[in-house]
Each structure stands twice: as structure tokens, then as C-alpha cells.
Amino acid sequence: MSAIAHTPVHLAPADWLARRAAHEQRVRVWVDPHQERASRGEKHPVYDFLFSYYAFRPAWLRRWHPGPDVILEGEAGREFLRWPEYREVDGGVMLDPATLPEHRHEFVTWLRGLLIATQERPAFFGCYGLHEWAMVYRQTPEEVRHNAWPLRFPPDEIARIVETGPVTCTHFDAFRFFTAPARPLNKLQPTRATTSHLEQRGCLHANMDLYKWAFKLAPFTPSELVADCFELACAIREVDMRASPYDLRALGFAPIAIETADGRAEYERHQRAFTSRSEPLRARLIALCERLLNL
């Protein structure tokens, strides 16, 4: 990969301070309710996932970074020097991608390959969200993860729906939470090693994971891109749980009845829309990986 010259963009204090304030205001819509629930010891079966499974602290999500090739002008920009990835340059302060350690270069190389393979592989729209059903298959009520919330069907009916599937999950990080009896029912047996060979852009979880990849590249990821990926992950999580066997109508989430033909069609419409929304975000992450590797 040949190096490409990039002319830094200079941001006057008024400009970058406005961008920072806009980012913080945007993410508070998600962060503040989560922190308020946490202060009360209150769990949420839909939104907690975005802060627990995706272990990026709310304070980190609120923190703004401009991304590579941006010079923050003015004395206020010096506050960014508390992070080792920033340095002083003529005119202000900017990220220094050369501070990315060698082992992180290996990760960025791997991630670029994964994102490109996912983008190029044909999208699959036939899973209908059965992964969430496979996670409670043949479990007792005490074993069910969100057992504070009712299931829409008794265990035997959930088992029948799973067994008549077909179950076609391509995403390892969903498959690994299947119950032991459910795993042999899946047409594929994903592993961590086969992720790059199976990941595809029709998968809700693969598109949610764009948020994970964005924050794993922080602080080199522009925070607007992190927020865009979080916004998509939030919308996907809502649909993911609406299509699950849980009855979350008390929280305002109407079920997507994937056990019916109409419900499967509704799920696929959401899946296709999320695939379209994911593609420009994935392209931006690929471009960021290439920018970091060019240095």
C-alpha cells in the first residue's frame, strides 16, 4: 500500500469547539438515560447491551476527537495533549498516527481485510432473527438471560419454531451464545477463525459491530463516525429484540412476529434497510484503516 500525502485541515477554535459541543449533545440522548438507569440499579433488556457487550464507557462515547489530518487551532487545543496520540505542530495540535504501535498495525490490517470482505460478500437475508430464539432454546426459565421479562411463547413452542427454522446464523459472536442443544441446528458452525470467511453485510450483528470497530480505533476515529455507528447499532438492537422471543411491549417495543410470514417479511425489510445504512459507514472505516496503514 503506497503512502498518500494528506494536507491537514485547519480548524479555528470556534469551528472545532462547535463540532465538539454538537457531538456531546448528540450522544447525551443515549448516554444520559443509560447513566440514570444505572444510578437506580435499573436494567434495560434492549439498551444495556450497547454499553455492556460493547464495552466503550459512556464517558468515552461523549469525548470528541477530530480524527487524522485535522489541526486544532488555538490555546484550547492544547488540552488534547493529555492523550499520547496528539502532538504539537505549527498552528496547533493534531493526532499523530505514527504513534500507533506495531501490534495495532496488525489489528488494523486484519480489520481492513474483514471490512472489505464483508462489503464485497453478497448479503444474506434469510436468517429472520432466529439467533435470539436459539439463545433460549431448551432453557429453563431460570436460565433465560433476560428472565425478568416474559417470553411470548412457552418453551415447547419456542423449541418448535427453532427446530422448523431453518437456523442460518453466519455471525460467530451471536452463534457462541446459542444454547448447546441449539448449535447443531445451525446450518453453519462459525468460529472466531472463520469470521472473515462468513461475515456478510446482511447480518444485523455484523452491522452493529461497525460501532465496535469504530471505537476500537479511537482516538483515531472521528467521533462523528463513532456516533453514526452507535446510532445504527441502537436502531438495529431495537429491531433485534423486537424480533426476539421476549415480550417487551411494556417497554414500548412491539414484537416482530418472525414466526409468521408477515413478520419474516417485516424483518427482512428492516434487514435490507440496515444493510444500505451500513455500507457508507463501513466504507468510511475502510478509508480510516487505509489512512492509518499508509503511515
Image (tube, rainbow, N blue to C red):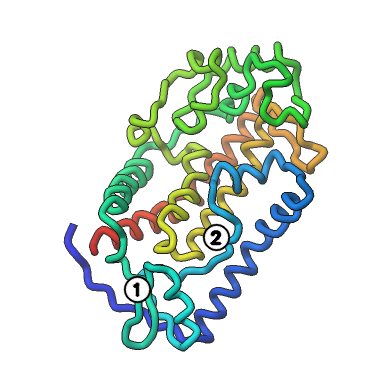
Q: Which residue is mark 2?
A: 60
Q: Position of residue 295 (x, y in %)?
A: 24, 64
Q: Position of residue 112 (x, y in %)?
A: 32, 49
- Mark 2 is on which residue type? Trp
Query: Does residue 209 appear left or right of residue 237 in this picture?
Result: left
Query: Does residue 275 appear left or right of residue 264 in this picture?
Result: left
Q: Quadrant of residue 120?
A: top left
Up the image or down, 277 lies above or below 295; here it is: above
Q: Secondary structure at mark 2?
A: helix
Up the image or down, 121 lies above or below 81; here it is: above
- Of residue 66 and residue 234, the one placed in the foreground of this image is 66
- Of residue 248 and residue 202, the one placed in the foreground of this image is 248
Quarter in which the N terminus is drawn = bottom left
| Disc number placed over residue 235 in the picture, else none | none
Q: Number of numbered discs present? A: 2
| Disc number placed over residue 69 in the picture, else none | 1
Q: Position of residue 60 (x, y in %)?
A: 54, 60
Query: Does residue 110 appear left or right of residue 141 in this picture?
Result: left
Distance from label 1 to label 2 (Cα)? 21 Å
Residue drawn at x 31%, y 66% is 97
